[in-house]
Image (cartoon, rainbow, N blue to C red):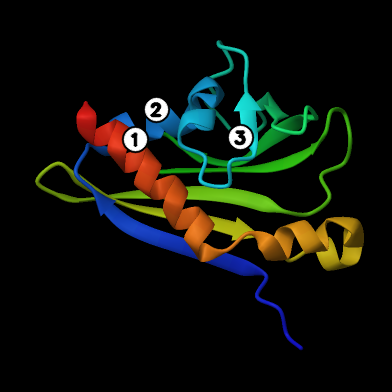
């Protein structure tokens, strides 16, 4: 059986890309829009600005994860690889892409790519397969509700 290793969801949000991006690039904001209900908290002051930055996030199970930024274009694209603090990322990536589509609207695409987990960390594969496009869409929907409020 072939498994889907890259999943994504997209939708247009009635908000400027810079407003939406700020909610994503500031880890302290992420638990309020997480559609996986996996993120508990991140300390303020960790807003990321470039490839190579990292932030710490506490998950709902109490584990702290270090997230290394591997793609970054302000107000357009951000992606990170989570791992145990100080550890090697096991091979799954979270990506957000924002594309202005006119009239103050932004097309937001959220992608989860766990292509490398099969080779590096088979213990995480069950959790990865439980993350669906619906989970990603839920994150975008929650993000939209916040961003569209202004």
Q: SS at mark 2? A: helix
Residue 110 seen? no
Residue 42 x %, y %: 62, 20
**Mark 1 Cα within 10 Å, few/some/many (few <14, many 20+)?**
many
Residue 105 x %, y %: 18, 46
Q: Nearer the viewer, residue 10 or 133?
A: 133
Position of the N terminus by quadrant: bottom right
Q: Which residue is at a point 41% across and 29% down the rendered structure image?
A: 23
Q: SS at mark 1? A: helix
Q: Which residue is mark 2?
A: 22
User: Which comes sooner in the sequence, label 3 or label 1?
Assistant: 1
- What is the distance, in whole Å, between disc 2 and disc 3 at their CAs? 16 Å
Q: Which residue is mark 1?
A: 20
Q: Nearer the viewer, residue 79 or 138?
A: 138
Task: Kindly give the residue lying farthest to the top in the view shown.
Answer: 45
Q: Which mark is residue 51?
A: 3
- In this rendering, the label closer to the viewer, 3 or 1: 1
Residue 30 seen? yes
């Amino acid at each position: 059986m072939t498994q889907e290793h890259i999943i994504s969801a997209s939708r247009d949000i009635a908000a400027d890309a810079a407003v939406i991006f700020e909610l994503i690039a500031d880890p302290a904001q992420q638990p309020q829009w997480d559609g996986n209900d996996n993120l508990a908290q991140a300390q303020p002051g960790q807003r990321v600005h470039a490839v190579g930055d990292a932030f710490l996030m506490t998950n709902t199970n109490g584990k702290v994860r270090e997230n290394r930024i591997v793609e970054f274009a302000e107000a357009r694209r951000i992606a990170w690889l989570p791992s145990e603090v100080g550890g090697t990322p096991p091979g799954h990536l979270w990506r957000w892409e924002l594309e202005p589509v006119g009239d103050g609207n932004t097309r937001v695409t959220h992608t989860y790519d766990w292509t490398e987990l099969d080779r590096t960390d088979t213990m995480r594969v069950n959790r990865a397969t439980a993350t669906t496009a619906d989970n990603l869409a839920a994150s975008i929907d929650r993000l939209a509700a916040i961003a569209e409020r202004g």
